[in-house]
Amino acid sequence: MSSIRCRQLCKTFKQGDEIITGLDHVDIDIEEGEFVCLSGPSGSGKTTLLNAIGGLDTPDSGEIHMGDIRIDRLERGPLADMRLHHIGFVFQSYNLIPVLSARENVEFVMQVQGVPAAQRSRKSLEILREVGLEGMENRRPAQLSGGQQQRVAVARAIVTHPDLVLADEPTANLDSVAASHLMDLFVELNQHHRITFVIATHDKRVMSYARRLIKMQDGKIISDEPQ
Amino acid sequence: MLVDVGLRLAWRNLWRHWRRTWLTVGAMIFSNGLLIFAMSLQFGSYDMMIDNSLHAYSGHLQLQHPRYLDEPKMRYALDNVAAIAERLRRELSLDSISARAAGFALASSEERSYGLQIVGVDPVHEPLVSTLPGLVKQGRYLKPGAAGEIVIGAVLARNLKISVGDELTFLGSGFDDSFAAGIVTVVGIFESGMADLDRALAQVELGYFQDVFAMQDRGHSLIVRARNIDDVESLQAQVKALLESNQDISLRHWEELQPGLRQAIQADMASNSFMYVVLVVLVAFSVLNTQLMSVLERTREFGTMMALGLQPARLSRLVMLETALMTALGLVLGIAVGLVVNLYLSRVGFSYPGMDEVALKFNLPERIYPAISLASMTLGPAAVAIGSLLAALYPALRLYLLTPIEAMRAV
């Protein structure tokens, strides 16, 4: 899997009697190893686009290709496998499993993938050290600060070295220092592991890290420029 | 999902709301314990009911003329009953086999007359097949070779207004349709607690009966009592093999002799089963409530897991695993509670106010003892476990309908 190609993506939502446009004929190509930021005000369609690319939501019309695979036509099972093996997600509200420790949260995806225990343990400790959580491996999410939880979520997203990381407002709940550390980590992973990053944000500090900035409004791409 | 992560996650999920989990597990423990106790008591009372009823009079097996069961007439008799009884005792190495002959007669005292069944018995072997000889409360039981003696039921004695030492005349019809009449002395009065026997049964010595009723060496039944109720089937097969060549003898199982007993047990089982089903359904609803709440409040978390690449089937398995763990806990602790209660009651017995009347009606002792068996220990808990797992199917299957994005948007 390498590039992402979206063609004429449309998505609407019903809110009461009102029809809200999430995506309005969006065309976008993202190449392997890119570091892309999607920006725009709330309701502009950033998260909807991320969800569509990640196979979490299906568009009303249009096509989404990931390499040679057309993911908008995949059944639930193959789509779940695609997410498991190729995509890492970082959510705004961390979404860690509260009953598992930091290390177990990071190991979770690997366990589902069937990675042997010793390898899981080694990789999870390594990645937690990399995101600055050494010594906190056995803490549960409730025992970690917001920034620390977000770093666990990032570690979980990247530990399997996915082809693509989709991050939705990853710094929204972080202070500036934590946000800056997180973005440095993303850049490093992007450069050293050629992981493609697509980040939805309206945080200008985050946008400053992007090499390509796509601005959205009312479900449409209004600008797409390299940084 | 791999077993290790599934187990760990399921176990920890259980204790997120430990009060709720314990309440549900508590309901399982209570119902498992109650089911074990009730079933053991039920099976125990059935065993006693069967044993007491059969030991009182009819025995476990009877050999009769093929038509005697349906038409208990004098002429449907077996030849040479004493010799057959002796042969069976020898061949089977079992003493508890006794011959009987029976007829109907009108018995009269100085003041009153009543109809009754007179039974000729072997006084040596009758106590080995029946408890009736041991239930003589006044006087004594029959002696071997003692002609002209009779023991009667307490109600009959009251009705005839006679007591031990009084004389009684009876008039009936003999084997050859001749008059059968005799004057006998009451030597004993028994109280079996069974109304039919106490009101209308009298016993005389078999030889005397055969003389008076012109039976010669004939009798109407050979009563066989097995050492244990569990031995009845094998004993039946042995007796059948021994008498294979004799077409004039029918071997009757106690269920044929006392169909009412089996029917009473089946009726009791049916009514109790209804109560058990209600209990299992209540527990199942408790599990359904717990697991449904648990699934609903974790919808976002399930959405995250699906987003990470878990198939809905794996999430369903996780919910089923949680239920299985909860059920296993309820099962183990419930069986332990049931076992402890049963072990205690199997020593001291179980009784409740007013039970003596019920016990008398069903031919039970005043205290009943639970019968601990594999069936009584496992049937109830197995039903609770199956009910609980079935109840968890609904919340588990709901996960199939979830999409990651809808689940993660859940409040």
Image: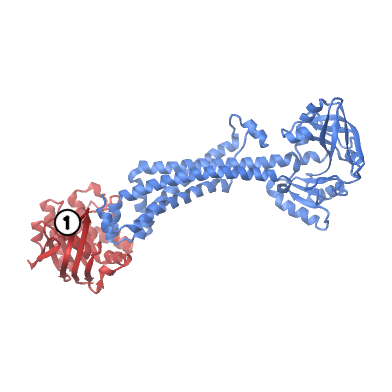
Chain colours: A red, B blue
Q: In the rendered image, which residue does mark 1 sit on?
A: A170
| Nearer to us in this view, A150 or B262 | B262
Quadrant for the N terminus of chain A in the image: bottom left
- Residue A166 percent coordinates (x, y): 19, 62
**Residue at horizontal 50 percent and vertical 43 percent from the top:** B278
Res. B330 visible in picture:
yes
Quadrant for the C terminus of chain A in the image: bottom left
Q: Residue furthest bottom?
A: A68
- Residue B361 percent coordinates (x, y): 67, 35
Q: Is residue A125 left or right of residue B295?
A: left
The crowd level at tag 1 (other Cα within 10 Å; few <14, some 14-19, many 20+) is many
Q: Residue furthest front?
A: A17
Q: Is residue B121 left or right of residue B323?
A: right
Q: Quadrant of residue A220?
A: bottom left
**Residue at horizontal 21 percent and vertical 69 percent from the top:** A62
Chain label for disc 1: A
- Residue B230 percent coordinates (x, y): 68, 48
Give the tally of numbered discs.
1
Q: Is residue B119 left or right of residue B20?
A: right
Q: Is residue A140 left or right of residue A8?
A: right
Res. A121 visible in picture:
no
- Residue B289 percent coordinates (x, y): 38, 46
User: In the picture shown, does residue A43 fall above or below B367?
Assistant: below
Look at label 1 and name its amino acid. Pro
Q: Quadrant of residue A2?
A: bottom left
- Under tag 1, what secondary structure? loop
| Nearer to us in this view, A13 or B121 | A13
